[in-house]
Image (cartoon, coloured by chain):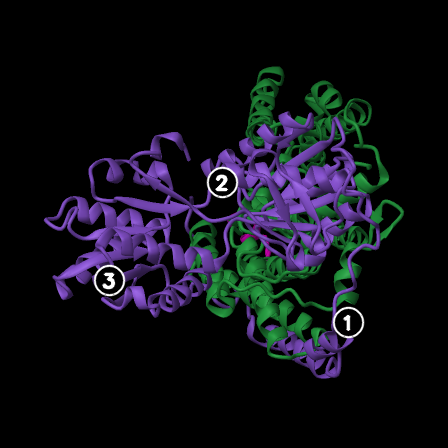
Chain colours: A green, B purple
Amino acid sequence: MPAEKPARSPETPARSAEATAEGAFGRLTGLARRWEGLILVLLVAVMLWASFAVDGFANPSNVSFLLLDTTEIAIMALTMTLVIVAAEIDLSVASTLGLSCAVLGWLWNAGLAIETIMPICLLVGALCGAVNGLLVTRLGLPSLAVTIGTFALYRGLAYVILGDQAVADLPPAYTGLATQTFGPIPLVTVLVAILAALAAVVLHATGLGRSIFALGSNEEAAFFAGVRVKRIKFWLFTASGVFASLASLVYTFRYASARADNGVGLELAVVAAVLLGGVSIFGGRGSLPGVLMAVLLLGVVRNALILADVANEVLNFVTGLLLVASVLAPNLGAVWRRRTTRRSVRLEGNTPR
Amino acid sequence: MTTFTPSRRRGARLGPRFGVVLATGLALLATACGGTTRDDVAASQPAVPAASAAASADPGAPLKQGLKIAFLPKQVNNPYFTVSDTGGADAGKEFGAEVKEVGPSDASASSQVSYINTLIQQKQDAIVISANDPNAVVPALKQAMAAGIKVVSYDSDVAPEGRHLFINQASAEDLGRTQVQLLAEQIGHKGKIAVLSATPNATNQNTWIEFMQDELKKPEYKDMELVKIAYGNDDDQKSFTETQGLLRSYPDLKGIISPTTVGIAAAARYLSDSPYKGKVKLTGLGTPNQLRKFVKDGTIDGFELWSPGDLGYLASYAAAALASGQITGAEGEKFKAGRLGEYTIGANGEVLLGKPTVFTKDNIDDFDF
């Protein structure tokens, strides 16, 4: 996968500094891309290792399981990337997914047509996201606190709506669609690809994307440069809600089970993938290809280790190690860069025009 | 962090745009009417599930050597399942099979599905599963069955189309009736008794209580009176105070049945520190490790539960019998399960483990779970 480079305008103020740091820059070709390169190398290495060393890994049916298993995380990671690049976070995504599942189950039991229920679920997702967005932008509350609150709120609401029952008599036409594959490629992976392309274009090839990077690296400066900070953030949260409910549809049909506890804990997997993908938790830096590779990397590692009968604790340990490394490496890289270039050069920022 | 307040004019004017989104959604709704509803699905579903595989059983077939059997509990590192799966592994040693336990550390259906998928790749001969969600694992289990893997559920059943056999730890009827019998013996078939249950709508407990009430109608219990069913909501604190309340309202209470592990532990804790210790008998469903102390200090004479080790042991034999072609999972087929003897498959592919085990101070140290 070609690492799409974060939009860096040629008129960056650090240009003169960049010239002096040309040597170091040439070798590093930017921290963000370097990290993506590392993830890519790691991904290829793990895949090669697993294909040879782990029985059944390269099997086409295993490949489709693997892709299928990363679907919901991938979908939610797309909008999570945008949100985190904007220096916010949405921890309520998995709860939004659960609420959307519960609404689906409840309305299905009430006898509504599934084609009617699906848009309602998306609306529910949009509403959940909009509530987050309003609390963050209108009341100026920190998104970490807001979404920890709605994390509990939406999940609680899901239990109120559906209780502890599971709705399982969903239409086979749709549940079949969710696990349908073309060769080793599941149909839902095509959906992920389309959504990913959409998100990548928005983030990396539009003015809106540049605004997101800008407000993520320096909200105040972006604001005075005319970026509509609050409006963009509001819509990012709303989009996050919509994508979470999209993921809930995939989840519900894939497991043929609508429950209030669907997707518990998934938000951490999503945030983990986004951070491993090289997105800075402080905002302003990151790229979608990196995140997608990270989602795949985590999925591949998990799948290969389970296939190799590695105990669950070791599995969690490896995932944790990868994450710590992902947070640690860019920081070590920054220290190293400061030592190699005399002047502090802000290269990693995606400075807006 | 720097603070600054952009003017309201600059902020998001969300009203109109959000309205547009809402309207679009509603329009979608309107156009989407007349799609697939629950009734359509129910109507298109065959009334009777297709008859199970036509493959014929060969009752005389020996158990195959070197079978690969995987136990997939709800959760690993859970003492109950560890004991159960160890029982399964013990059985495997007896007939020369390779038995392993794999599973998620969170008790979720979705992670179980990942494990089922990998077990298919590993070409196991049989999967023995305790399902976190009876339906969510079915599509994956169907794929396993299509790949020739035999599926046995234990402890917690899956929808029948997703497995060949279900090893039922104890029937609801046995559990309900034996708890009354146990308490009746302890109080000499005489006096007021109460039930401390889980939540008022707990399916399992309510079924057991129905059988308890039915058992109490028999003539030998004519001097026993069920005065109250209290609900501790499977919450330790609430169960504790409910027990307290029971004894306050009925000072002449002779016995309490608590058919839930949380309830019985809380009630035992209350009784052991109260003057009622040993005078008010307590029984129900609990685990030996949780109640050992109370059995030894005389708060509890005896309580019951199925033996999880035997459950895994039987499940292992059932899986091996399926994989060796001795049985196909049809009603009436018989198979031998080592030291437990011979079992017959009942309706819906269910095999009943047997009567629950009663734990008293004489045998409690033989169990560790």
Give the side of residue B22 with respect to residue B148, left or right.
left
Mark 3 = which residue?
Answer: B193
Mark 2 = which residue?
Answer: B308
Q: Nearer the viewer, mark 2 or mark 3?
A: 3
Labelled disc at residue B46: 1
Q: What residue span does the magenta drawing correspond to?
A: A220-227
Circle 2 residues within 10 Å: few <14, some 14–19, many ≥20 = many
Q: Residue B77 or A102: which is nearer the viewer? A: B77
Spatial distance from mark 1 to mark 2, Cα to Cα?
A: 36 Å
Is B99 located above or below residue A257 in the figure?
A: above
- Disc 2 chain ID: B
Q: Position of residue A161 (x, y in %)?
A: 50, 69
Spatial distance from mark 2 to mark 3, Cα to Cα?
A: 29 Å
Q: Position of residue B364 (x, y in %)?
A: 34, 35
- Amino acid type of the residue that numbered disc 1 sits on in the rendered structure: Pro
Q: Secondary structure at mark 2?
A: helix
Q: Nearer the viewer, mark 1 or mark 3?
A: 3
Q: Nearer the N terminus, badge 1 or badge 3?
A: 1
Residue with the most extreme front position: B219
Residue occupying image coordinates x 15% and y 64%: B250
Residue with the most extreme left position: B275
Q: Position of residue B331 (x, y in %)?
A: 70, 56
Q: Is residue A84 covered in magenta?
A: no
